Amino acid sequence: TDIVLTSESKHILEAKKEYETNATLKSLVPFPYRFITNDGDVMQGTGRPRNFGEDLSNETSADDIMLSAITSLKTQLKAGFSVGNCCSNFHNLIFDFLRDGCGAAEESFSQCLQENQDAEFRVCCQWTKTEECLKKKEAKKK
């Protein structure tokens, strides 16, 4: 099983590296898998173009960021099943493309993490005001 993992956030890809080197955690997954990532990802840290470069070296250009985003998009479109953070316009774009048949798989399925049945994996958008999300936000502050 291949797991395509793309993120603009460095901490997500750092967590992937930690996970891959932890034999105990890896043993909890009951099937063989490998992560596919965008090795050229610049991890700009935001989906807002006006904020691009705030956390990057001066050597990272707007062209580097666009190439990184387009490469990640192309990689995600090869998946047959996608899970995304639908607070992200980028993930919503990917899901729109997949629903409209632009992916490589004959059939593709997508799920927003906001709708995950398991509350542990359910994420909250910055603007979400449900009781569950307000509790999660409060817990993060502590």
Image: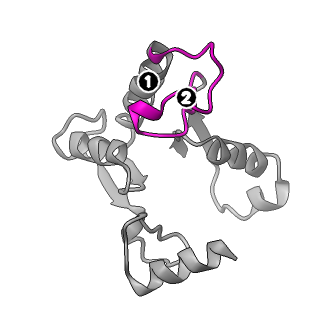
The residue depicted at 58 percent of the width and 79 percent of the height is: 138
**Residue type beneath disc 1:** Thr
Q: Is residue 11 left or right of residue 7?
A: right
* Marks 2 & 1, CB-CB < 8 Å contact: yes
The kind of residue tagged 2 is Asn
Q: Residue at x 56, y 27 (%)?
A: 41
**Count of numbered labels shown in the rendering:** 2
Q: Which residue is mark 1?
A: 71
Q: Which residue is mark 2?
A: 38
Q: Foreground residue, 102 or 133?
A: 133
Q: Which quadrant of the view contains residue 140?
A: bottom right
Instruction: List x then y, in percent, for residue 46.
Output: 48, 40
Secondary structure state at the residue bearing disc 1? helix
The part of the image, by quadrant, that contains residue 26 is bottom right
**Does the magenta segment cover residue 50?**
yes
Magenta highlight on residue 65: no
**Residue 80 position within the rendered picture, expressed as x and y whole percent measured from the top left:** 36, 45
Of 121 and 98, nearer the camera is 121
